[in-house]
Image (spheres, coloured by chain):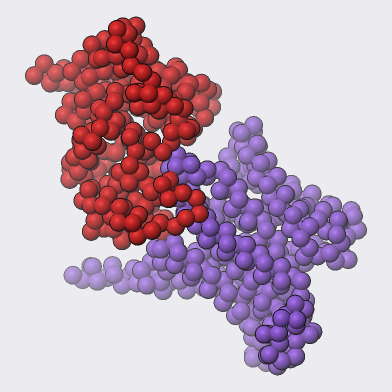
Chain colours: A red, B purple
Amino acid sequence: MHDRSSSGLHLLHDTDTSKTVSPQDLPFTVQGMTVAYHHKPVLWGVSYSAPKGCLTAIIGPNGAGKSTFLKAALGLIPKLSGDTKVFGAPIEKSLKRIAYVPQRSAVDWDFPATAIDVVLMGLYGQIGWFRWPSRKHRQKAMDCLKSVGMQDFANRQIGQLSGGQQQRVFLARALAQDSEVYLMDEPFAGVDAATEKAIVAVLRQLVADGKTVLVVHHDLETVRDYYSHILLLNGQHVADGPVETTFTAENLQKAYGGRLASTQLDGLSEASSA
Amino acid sequence: MDIFLQFDLPSILLGSLAALACGLLGNFLVLRKQALMGDAISHVVLPGIVIGFLFTHETSSWAMMLGAGGAAIFAVLLIELIRRIGNVEPGAAMGVVFTTMFAAGVVILEQTGTAGVHLDVEHALYGNLESAIWLDAYSLSDLWNWQVLMTLPESIKQLFVVNMLVIVFIVLFFKELKISSFDPLLSASLGFSPKWLGLSLIVMVAIAAVAAFTAVGSILVIAMFICPAATARMLTDNLKAQLFISGIASLSAGLFGYLLAAFGPGLLGYEFSVSAAGMIAVVAGLQQVLAMLFAPHYGVVMRRRRQRAHASV
């Protein structure tokens, strides 16, 4: 069940190649990704290419391997097979073109660092080995904090920020990386309404600036409002494409199986017909 | 004065410099939740030290240092291997490797007859701080006299060099150590390999542990790896300030630990003095207790007071 109308971006599993796209134009392409934890497969031969300049939600049930997909694609965890290309080049050579926002729980918030310290870390790649951040870098980090509305908390130790504020600091750090592709692991998990709004605004701005953004997302009810494209996973690739044609009851049923109550599915598909 | 210069000062220097080298690196061990790695490493280096000693027959030689660094790398690889193949948690793998290698070190020590000559198990465990003497020093002006300074005990000069290495390592890699400790995934994705940084940290820890080991012994090394860093963490939220404070805490533990051990019992009217190495660790521990109680922001006392203020509002 692949959507064929969504241009030639889905080269990997699309036979309709009337409009060929050169690999250099594909911001983020994963081919045959298989990952196992302790001999238990988590991802099976997932192939996917992200549409350029779009905001895409990665959705699927718990344990579908959404976070694993991002981490394995980035080479942060071992995989059995599969490779990732960023604008046609191998991922190892393109790490600077990608910004990854891990789950908030991935780090120790008691660490002796302030909000601006954490944002500065996003600039370390540009600063390079051995050098210390300059005033110019601090200024840029401050600008990034401003764009997520956190400038007043720059010198606050990160453990003393609320969950939503911590998430915004993470987002500011990703902005500082100034990449072309953004991969975010559940940025909306456990955040307040104000933060959710701020994050959505930033995501839209990124896309408006021509960036390609992939977000692991949990809340099916907001998919339609926030995103233009989706990737559905359940250990395997289920479907991907524009929300209007891909975010269907049929596809969700396929991805979630019995885990979505039929009333939920009705609600979501109703929204699609509205 | 010459007695102080000849007998007390060398011990103070040895103890303080040992504490400083371990205390500074300890910050990163504690932040990486690898505090016990310091303990493990100070044990696994024993076979490396003994083998280094067998080659040169000198204590505090650079061959020992080299052997220790090699043993540390070997241990880290072995821990990783056992963790992967044995499918056990890292703590268990560490436990297996560090006891085995330490035991191997003891066996080599006993079998090669080096035990009891220059390097014995007791000193390896408890240190030998009081043995440092500087007989060429007669007056304070000798502290500025390069020629006399060069007659300082070899172990002190070595610790001085090791401290320089530690400080250069931390200054050069401050940013990299910070990011790889805080967020290894981001660190990796930006091209700062947490694996290599972690390994180089462990090698530095091994070097510091060996240099400190003649002074304070391998058991007490762990106190120096953890206490000053944990003390400093209570007092600041800034990593640079934390490093600085932990340095001061280390040096003062070395100084006051020795003074208390050497002169404390005398002040109370006793004729003996107590183990300086032991006292340094005790002072380091006391510093931490004081910080936990009275730190301006995180201390128990201030937190209680804030809670009470909150409750009464």
Q: Report the residue at 59% width, 69% height from top.
A: B20
As drawn, which residue projects farthest toward the right? B113
Q: How many marks?
A: 0
- On screen, residue A181 versus residue B83, left or right, reads left
Residue A170 can be seen in this image:
no
Q: Nearer the viewer, residue B276 or A140?
A: A140
Residue B263, image x and y in percent? Answer: 66, 87
Question: Looking at the image, is A228 positioned above or below residue A94?
Answer: above
Residue B95: horizontal and vertical position, in percent? 65, 47
Residue under the image location 79 percent in, 57 percent down: B63
- Residue A208 quadrant: top left
Residue B298 rendering spot, x and y as whole percentages: 38, 66
Q: Quarter of the image holding residue B58? A: bottom right
Rendering quarter of residue A207: top left
- Residue A141 lies, in percent from the top left, at 31, 53
Q: Using residue B290 as the reference point, say whether residue B313 is left or right of it.
A: left
**What's the residue at 41%, 74% (across, down)?**
B294
Residue at horizontal 50 percent and vertical 45 percent from the top:
B192
Q: Is residue B151 left or right of residue A97?
A: right
Q: Up-down: is B204 above or below A220?
A: below
- In depth, the one of A184 and A139 nearer the eye is A139
Query: Quarter of the image containing the N terminus of chain A?
Result: top left
Which quarter shows the C terminus of chain A? top left
- In the displayed structure, A257 sits above or below B199; it is above
- Note whether residue B53 is visible: yes
